[in-house]
Amino acid sequence: MSSKSFFIINYGCQMNFLESQKIAGQLEGIGYSYAPDKMNADYVVLNTCAVRETAERKIYGTIGLIKKYGKSGVKIAVGGCVTQVKGKEIYDRYKQVDIIFGSRNKEMLPQFFESADKGKRILNLDEIVNEDIEYALSAKRDSKYSAFVEIMKGCNNFCSYCIVPYARGREISIPPDNIKDKIVGLIDKGYKEFTLLGQNVNSYGKKFTDDKDRNYRFLDLLNDLEGINGIYRLRFITSHPKDFSFELADLMATSNIIAHSLHLPIQSGSNKILKLMNRGYSKEDYIEKISYLRSKIPDIALSTDMIFGFPSEDERDFLESIDILKKINYQIAFLFQFSVRTGTAAAKMEEKFIDNKTKLERLQYAIDFQNKISYERSKNYIGNIEDLLFYSSDKTGKKLMGRDTHNMIVVADGKKKDIGNIKKVKINDGNSYTLFGSQLNE
Ligand code: SAM
Ligand code: SF4
Ligand code: F3S
């Protein structure tokens, strides 16, 4: 048992977020305490993201600040996607970093801490593929009712702009029994809502971590989860448009637990750019799938990711992206400017790079455009009655918060005892990202 404290700084996607929760749960389980802030911790863990340069750049400044103003003798551990691709480089260049670990060996951190205490520097990117169920269950989750559950690791798609396949390795699926055991274990702890995580959940089951031959795919997993008692709501991210099937749309329409929301990143509205991105679908394929889904679930709320300023994107391509935002009428769109990632195919399209000013202008235009759409859509929820699982208090501590079936954050009146319960809420107002409501007395 240790009496020392740690602090985790997390960057990146839900996968990283869940992994930071697992690191925290493990460390607390063996006696470390969570420090109030990074400057007062004995160990600071940076769980990094490499998806865009901005995310990556942040870590270097933070390392310097902690060594300068942090607790005397503080040990710094850097892990996650950046170290997977350039761990050795960081180890050689940043002598202030005591431990470099990867994204598949976070379980080894306690032993790395011990070695660092003895004055050793560590560079270890080993892979532990089969994660212990207890380890996953002991994650220090920020909600007692809603949990992320990892179903896959890695990615095989090699979209030309994306670093993830290099950082996270090839795609492997976690065996169904392991996933079901985790969910049942979480239900026993009081969890009611689950979000299944994978970079491309629709290709679940192509290859399992245990190397067993199974003919068991994402639809089978969803069907099996439907049969588990105690799941109130189920979500999954991320779906890939090339693999999202009509059968999945049918299943979503008839399910009693799958939420009426779908994150289906289109990335661009131009077929020329989609081809260069190596996405494997056309704008027309995407529209066809969405039309089918909407015919089955008219109230489905869609969200997307989109990149602006991809190499060779011209004004026409840009306007096609704007047009698709309008056509699909997304509830939420996560919009980014293209960031060059060394080692990816798009990094070699140098002669077609778009200048920063144009990239930024296009991105800003798109953000403003989408904000109006999101705002209008939110106003359309006014008067609706939504079933809501309250997760927590809001920032003021006076109201409660939850997410509805459309994955909208809803803030409503309520007492602390309502947290963890499902209530009917009438929507009274909304802005682009949040709805406001009042509880109906039953
Ligand atoms: N697997 C998911 C998918 O295929 O949609 C998402 C993975 S990625 C972690 C999240 C988002 O980051 C992507 O959908 C993409 O829009 C964005 N992204 C990835 N690489 C990028 C890059 N080089 N520049 C800008 N945005 C990028
Ligand atoms: Fe990246 Fe494409 Fe894989 Fe998503 S599907 S993680 S964008 S390579
Ligand atoms: Fe996630 Fe960033 Fe890695 S988005 S998979 S933490 S590169």
Image (cartoon, grey):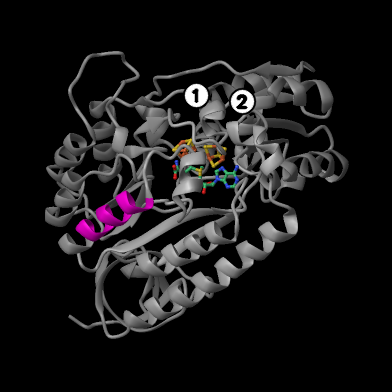
| Numbered badge on residue 277 | none
Ligand 3 within 8 Å of the CB at mark 2: no
- Asked if the residue under mark 2 is in contact with the one under mark 1, i.e. CB atoms within 8 Å, the reply is yes
Residue occupied by mark 1: 169
| Most common secondary structure along the magenta stretch | helix
Query: Which residue is rendered at x = 73% and y = 54% of the image?
Result: 356
Q: Is residue 363 left or right of residue 320?
A: right
**Is disc 1 placed on a helix, strand or loop?**
loop
Whole-percent x and y of residue 424?
24, 75
Q: Which residues are magenta?
A: 283-293
Q: Quadrant of the N terminus?
A: top right
Query: Which residue is rendered at x = 49% and y = 70% of the image?
Result: 370
Structural crowding at the residue carrying mark 2, measured as other residues with C-alpha within 10 Å and reported as few (<14), some (14–19) or many (≥20): many
Exactly how many numbered labels are in the figure? Answer: 2
Q: Is residue 59 left or right of residue 178?
A: right
Please check the rendered image and state whether residue 285 is part of the magenta-colored stretch, yes or no. Answer: yes
Whole-percent x and y of residue 236?
33, 47
In the depicted view, which residue is nearer to us: 268 or 335? 268
**Is disc 2 placed on a helix, strand or loop?**
helix
Distance in Å between CA atoms under marks 1 and 2: 9 Å
Residue occupied by mark 2: 84
Structural crowding at the residue carrying mark 1, measured as other residues with C-alpha within 10 Å and reported as few (<14), some (14–19) or many (≥20): some
In the depicted view, which residue is nearer to us: 382 or 44? 382
Q: Quadrant of residue 351?
A: top right
Q: Amino acid at mark 1?
A: Gly
Q: Amino acid at mark 2?
A: Gln
Q: Is residue 77 left or right of residue 344?
A: right
Q: Quadrant of the C terminus?
A: bottom left
